[in-house]
Amino acid sequence: MNAVPVLEVKDLRIEFPTRRGTLVAVDGVSFSIAPGEVLGVVGESGAGKSLTGNAIIGLLEPPGRIAAGEVRLEGERIDQLDGERMRRIRGRRIGAIFQDPLTSLNPLYTVGEQLVETIRTHLPADAAEARARALALLSEVGIPAPEARIDHYPHQFSGGMRQRVVIALALCAEPRLIVADEPTTALDVSIQAQIIQLLKRLARERGTAVMLITHDMGVIAETADRVAVLYAGRIAEIGPVREVVRGARHPYTVGLMGAIPKIGAGAGKHSSRLVQIEGAMPRLNAMPSGCAFHPRCGKSFDRCARERPEPVPVGANLTACWLYDDRRPAA
Amino acid sequence: MTTGAPPREGRGRLPLLRLEGVGRDFDVSRPWLNRVLEGAPRQLLHAVDDVSFDARRGETLALVGESGCGKSTLARLIVGLYPPSRGRIEFDGVDISDPQARAETARLRRRMQMIFQDPYASLNPRWRVRDIVAEPIRVLGLASDEADIASRVAELLRQVGLSPEDGDKYPHEFSGGQRQRISIARALSGRPEFLVCDEPTSALDVSVQAQILNLMSDLQAQLGLTYLFISHNLAVVSHVADRIGVMYLGRLVELADAQELFARPRHPYTRMLLDAVPDLEMSGRQRTPVAGEVPNPLSPPAGCAFHPRCPHANERCRAERPALIQRAGSAAACHAVEESRI
Amino acid sequence: MSFRSFWNHDLAYSFRRSPVTIVAAALTLLCVGGALLAPWIAPTNPFDAASLDLNAAFAPPAWIAQGGRGHLLGTDDQGRDLLSTILYGARISLGVGVASVLFALALGVTLGLVSGYFGGRVDAMIMRIADVQLSFPAILIALLVDGVARVILPASSHDEIAVPVLIMSIGVSGWVQYARTVRGSTLVEKGKEYVQAARVIGRRPLAILLHHVLPNVMGPVLVIATIHIATAIITEATLSFLGVGVPPTRPSLGTLIRIGNEFLLSGEWWITLFPGIALVTLVLSVNLLGDWLRDALNPKLR
């Protein structure tokens, strides 16, 4: 496959200037997504995963700003574009899906009107062509009887169906990249499974790159090809999903995986205690020195508090941890 | 080595909690004037309908279901936040849903407490933590001497993994997980034997969820508590529960021992829920695709409420509502199971 | 850091950054200070009948050629020193304003809490009364209450009870917005889990209302109250201007403006102008302070 990734993020740094000093919310985050690939970005609240997504689609809320690094869409830098040019890219080349399908849709217009308007904004199509395309999209995302549903208002759809409409809206202009921020969090499990299947199929069939942001490791395991684990605004570990889920290297990933209750592994009470990571994610204004995870890490040693680890290849993954540094002094 | 198990009052062999045909309706009609002008009828939402089960002493009984299945309403009926519209709720053999027996009911309700879902809404933001935790002690008159109260609060905070100095702070100074610990300390301060936990970890991150689940299981072992654990997350439930009830559209569709439920789910809805859980082990297990969505609870389907989504539905399912039938270790409300079709 | 000091810290910061607010605060302080300290700083006591000097009536301000004679802002029709009268008048205006706001606040908050927490018929009744009252201008309600009180109470006591009646009538005309705001916040707070937790513990409704709900609904109410003080002062001035407010022997700013109004066309403009300026300054600065407080406490507007 060709070497140019759809999305390439290099050393991204997001800052929030406040009157009590500048807070660094995301720092040194690098990753890329190939065509047709689903990259899962997983992390707990405050890890900076949504900020990263918003920075890529140019919707960082002020005073937040990209302070360093670059974002490239199909090789072209997009992190320094002005609002108007970014708006044209959003929708045309990047589609966005957010957590709450209700706020992503305008309640005053039918879904058909919204789809047709989006299509005609970005593609040369007359009203009839746009409507035909809207119908095709609705049936592609699995909405039954699209001819009847296209003239309904958002409130006439259930939560799961609404999220399908949002996905159809994101697909209107055949974007190369879809940024989906917690697309299934507001949905029930049975609906969540349907939406996951849909995203996966779209990526595969259309060759769209998908950045799937979620806190739910289960969703990632089901959907993603590769996964980046974020902790305190930095990538702790990134690699193929099977490697990260079953053979995590970074102590945080290991802890995270152990903390997730699982069905099947001898179901029933007192089967096993969950692995617990003591403490909580640090606040932005109290970031520990060195590796941000060291105060909660059972394997930390003095270097962890002093120096910040960069991601280095460990097996198939990149892992930012001094445990895997060859220069580690014999302890 | 903190407190021993609280003293138990007799009747040890009865279930601690028994529900019989409990139902609760909510009037969701438009305002009176609109109804008159539009000729619309009164509309009742049957949030909980004909639910019966027992909770045994010392066990964790979990209720699972998707949003709108009535599990949270059921929790609130049990702790008395709403009166039931129908049925009986017995605690330690006494009917606590009877509005006539106020005094007796109030005495029994002291023995149950509740832990809520949202750690950001369940603590009064204007109160210091020590006052929040001490409130049940003061209200229930468990101690009147301020020094006794202070030492009991300190002990409770230690018990849930916080430090006694945290009592001086306000809730906003704590993270979600720490707030949930405060909630637990408040629930325990009334020395209850029965705790209703309404989605206690669903607002928390996984690593924090693990801390809270472990804490709850430690406390249960130490204090001999009985839990009613409400959750939408089957994986969490499989981790904590002795027995599990599955709810769909206000009704209990299956009730079984945890092991049995996961090994041999019987109701088609339970099977569907299990299939929908993301496969974290990446075992590549075969899954039947989930179909359809939960219907509008205002106009539930006739017969078995699940029949429009059920692959095994037949004429009987569309017409006749199945009852919960006990059969070899588990109970299911399904005609197909009863007729051994599945 | 405790909650309070943090909170004050942010407020102080937004205060420092708003020059308009600083000016408004200074002016408010000046008005309030002048009003409170009137007995000590005013040149004369205008309420003291012995100090009246009809010969000195209609003296223009000191800086005008034929003015002077020790009256900085001149004198009114009865020879009272205008500066003193304004200082004492502001005292009455402010006092009536604050007292009627407190009255409206107590009434509105109580009714709003009851309405929001208990709902049902009580709620419907209180809110319908509120709706009806809102369909009349506040000044009309105040006039009505004032008129009714004057009819009911014996005529001999009118002058003594004028101020309490005024406070009550302005207060009654203003409770609705408190009740509505508090009812709305109460509905929100009532649904929150900490209130449910208190109910599970077995606390009684009154205790829950006082200890749990009330502290959490007071924020917006205090902002409304600040802005309402300005409105109440205006209402008092209007009533006094219409002649149903405080008696001319103990004039408020509004009474002074009415007295001066009669002489405006005959050239004695100062009698109405200076009390007018004092009133505008007081109301405007209190209003600006209230607006700032509202914005500073509402993170959504920042």
Image: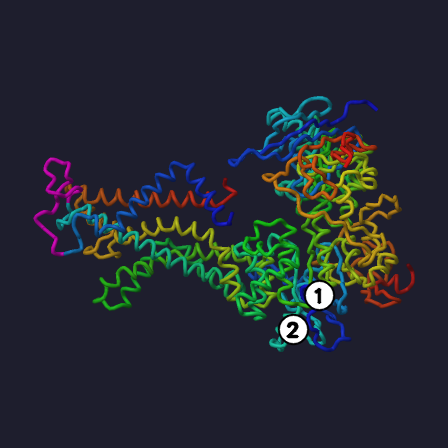
Left-right relation of B120 to B240 = left
Q: In this view, does B25 lie above or below B180?
A: below
Q: Position of residue B86 (x, y in %)?
A: 69, 71
Q: Is residue C66 magenta?
A: yes
* Magenta region: C49-74
Q: Earlier in the sequence, mark 1 or mark 2?
A: 2
Q: Which mark is residue A105?
A: none
Taking depth in this image into account, of B154 and C210 the one nearest to the observer is B154
What kind of secondary structure does the magenta stretch mostly adopt? Answer: loop
Name the residue located 73 percent from the left edge and 30 percent from the top edge.
Answer: A31
Residue A144 in view in this figure:
no
For disc 2, the neighbor class at 10 Å (few under 14, some 14 to 19, many from 20) is some
Left-right relation of A44 to C206 = right
* Local SS, label 1: helix
**Which residue matches tag 2?**
B108
Q: Is residue C270 magenta?
A: no
Taking depth in this image into account, of A145 and B287 the one nearest to the observer is B287
Name the residue located 50 percent from the left edge and 39 percent from the top edge.
Answer: C302
Q: Where is residue A271 in the image (x, y as percent from the top left)?
A: 82, 56
Left-right relation of B37 to A217 = left
Q: Where is residue A112 in the image (x, y as percent from the top left)?
A: 69, 38
Taking depth in this image into account, of C147 and B71 the one nearest to the observer is B71
Left-right relation of B298 to B330 = left
Quarter that holds the N terminus of chain A: top right
Label 1 or label 2, whichever lies nearer to me, is: 1
Circle 1 chain: B
* Amino acid type, mark 2: Leu
Q: Where is residue B29 in the image (x, y as percent from the top left)?
A: 62, 60
Circle 2 chain: B
Q: In this view, does C73 lie above or below B309?
A: above
**Which residue matches tag 1?**
B223
